[in-house]
Image: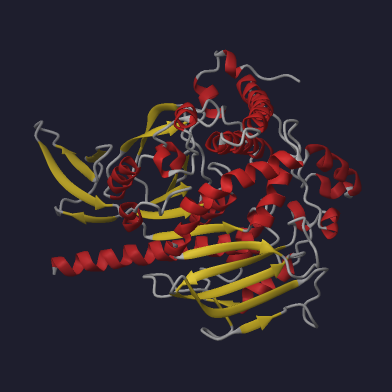
Amino acid sequence: MAVSTIYSTQALNSTHFLTSSSSSKQVFLYRRQPQTNRRFNTLITCAQETIVIGLAADSGCGKSTFMRRLTSVFGGAAKPPKGGNPDSNTLISDTTTVICLDDYHSLDRYGRKEQKVTALDPRANDFDLMYEQVKALKNGVAVEKPIYNHVTGLLDPPELIQPPKILVIEGLHPMFDERVRDLLDFSIYLDISNEVKFAWKIQRDMAERGHSLESIKASIEARKPDFDAFIDPQKQYADAVIEVLPTTLIPDDNEGKVLRVRLIMKEGVKYFSPVYLFDEGSTISWIPCGRKLTCSYPGIKFNYEPDSYFDHEVSVLEMDGQFDRLDELIYVESHLSNLSTKFYGEVTQQMLKHADFPGSNNGTGLFQTIVGLKIRDLYEQLIANKATARAEAKA
Amino acid sequence: MMSATATVMRGRVLLPSHRENRLISTGSEILRLRETVPKRFRLMMVTTATAKYKGTKMREEKLSEMIEEKVKEATEVCEAEERLEECRVAWDEVEEVSQARADLRIKLKLLNHDPLESFCQENPETDECRIYED
């Protein structure tokens, strides 16, 4: 989706060929003259707009199913850079590049041990470099980004990152630094409640021989002070917060299998129109299971309401329970509005595409997919807007 | 293309265990579940992938060892009350390595992708890129 301005009226035919310089936005068109060796240059300048999305999550990088759903909405699968460092945290697809903010650690594991700071502490991260490089990529300039190796705990030699159409910065501190925050076109905070975090970490770690229930608990408790001081406050800046809580449908459920997920959407964000249920701005409570739709235990419950979040006006869409069948999903989709889908059933199709990913049967997968569609919508609007602005400037 | 009458689907939407709200998390559980699913659906199930290259297998083992070591270390360090900061750093390390281990497991199991894949295409002769035989 590049917008190009052509500065010559030379016709393109077989006597012309294209070259492009790797890091600039310019494409040079050469025409070979059969009799002489003179070459006529035609300059085509393609302005590629890069949008920057920030995702704050405490779940490490590289596995994030959120990222995979997001890149899938844009088309193509995100893969690590070919031929480079196998421990790279970066993911690249045709349109999207996902950068892990751990790469901007100023202290490696040994440095942090020595200085007695956790990875959550801003003192362990180089925000100046983060700002410089995100700014450069946004302006269409490639950067040599360091690599933090999670296996060795060391900082590896840098890798070259080309400016993509969509740049996603994922990690613990995307919205911590004010300058970086101003570069973000959209930001998301994944807010997992303590009970759910505990349940997920048990599932994640119990198979490891080093871990026990006590060690998992101790690890969460020990990280909590730094987390509450440095990471949690970022949620006030996010345009969308996905809150994951234990379900209210099953009394005393502590397995974290059935979830209550809330999508908190900030009002008044440019190019972002919140999803709503039935009547925008009203308060709705909806249980789709009934005569037209049969659900299995524990069923599905939706809530929608306007609210206030850190002194901002927000709209909150909430789903409690889980999908058991395809027709439940399509039924729910058909009743939601402002989804920014391009065709009926797109949300369901995206969910089915990744049916084996965690969260595919509950609000986490649903809202991640919806946020992905919203970002696509934002991108397209931004591009269209810049194109008309450029056209008007020429006129 | 989405089919509204599709009954054959991959993943948790179809598997019988889903009704018990069980989360499938280990390879052996997937294998056990295969027996309960009618033969015609089995091809659709996601099977566990294990490491393809020696280098990946080595990383898996190294990370598992590190988890064990670091949990022990953190437990020891935290016994002394005056070493609060070191205690936090020690558990943060445990978290980091646990997450790295889980990431690798997910890449192999869910995405069926060995992280050394593209590196080994370019450098098949290195020791890390020997095919791992169980």
* Quadrant in which the N terminus of chain B is drawn: bottom right
Q: Nearer the viewer, residue B108 or A385?
A: B108
* Quadrant in which the C terminus of chain B is drawn: top right
Residue A192 location, x and y as percent? 60, 57
Q: Nearer the viewer, residue A113 or A158?
A: A113
Q: Is residue A43 left or right of residue A253?
A: left
Report the number of discs: 0
User: Does any portion of residue A1 appear in the rendered image?
Assistant: no
Q: Residue at x 49, y 44 (%)?
A: A120
Q: Is residue A147 left or right of residue A79?
A: left
Residue A277 location, x and y as percent? 59, 80
Residue A206 location, x and y as percent? 75, 39
The quarter holding residue B98 reads top right
Q: Is residue A45 left or right of residue A291?
A: left
Q: Residue furthest front?
A: B82
A118 over A172 or under it: above or below = above
Q: Residue at x 76, y 37 (%)?
A: A207
Residue A321 location, x and y as percent? 73, 67
A80 over A258 or under it: above or below = above
Q: Nearer the viewer, residue A384 or A200?
A: A200
> What colouring style does the render use?
secondary structure
Q: Nearer the viewer, residue A61 or A162?
A: A61
User: Does any portion of residue A323 appear in the rendered image?
Assistant: yes
